[in-house]
Amino acid sequence: MDTSYLTSVKKQFEYYKSLGDKTFAQLTEKQFFWLPNTDDNSIAITIKHIAGNMLSRWTNFLTEDGEKEWRNRDDEFINSFTTKEEVITYWEMGWQCLFNALNSITPKNFDSIVYIRNQGHTITEAINRQLCHYSYHIGQIVFLGKLLLGNEWESLSIAKNASKDYNTDKFSKEKSRTHFTDDL
């Protein structure tokens, strides 16, 4: 088992979670539930979907199909929350489930095949599938946050017109083996 992959992917998941967390910190409760129109998803609904997916995919992921019988995916797109705190609590439940599952991977079970809707995946394939899925939706959340806040938005990455200073700082340091999130 290549432990560097698991270490790296955990950091990637932590990074995407932090993008969500930093977006949430900038938003009001009203903004969490804002809908551009009735066919769109609010930030709260998108979070409900992400966390619902996490709970389904990562609960007993080595022994049960990732699409649980108890999951009602369609219900994830109907808001059932009344406060920002409820939404964030559900978000945290999903992430806790994910990280618990990742922490249960060992050299003995790393070569297991896991199933999502009866389709077999290596553990690496299942992780990559979900990493891409979550980053896709977290990008939507960040975009909505930027849209809602306009000029009040605090950038979560290298701000416009700051690339030169950022690169000057990076290249002023010795080369080293680190994950890009280590100094965020």
Image: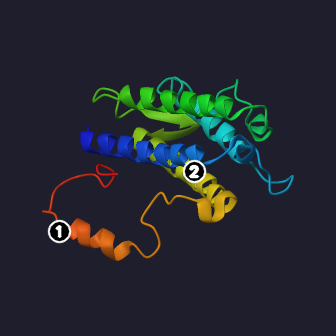
Give coordinates of residue 115: x percent, y percent: 54, 35
Along the viewing direction, whichever of 145 and 57 lies nearer the viewer: 145
Describe the element under mark 1 as helix, strand or loop. loop
Which of pointers 1 and 2 lies earlier in the amino acid sequence?
2
Pinpoint residue 90: horizontal percent, then vertical percent: 62, 29
Q: Residue furthest front?
A: 152
Residue receiving disc 2: 138
Q: Which mark is residue 74?
A: none
Q: Which residue is mark 1?
A: 172
Image position of 177 (left or right of 38): left
Q: Residue at x 44, y 43 (%)?
A: 13
Instruction: Name the foreground residue: 73 vs 81.
Output: 81
Find residue 70 and report its horizontal and vertical position in percent. Answer: 70, 24
Q: What residue type is disc 1 on?
A: Ser
Question: For residue 56, what is the image quadrant?
Answer: top right
Q: Amino acid at mark 2?
A: Ile
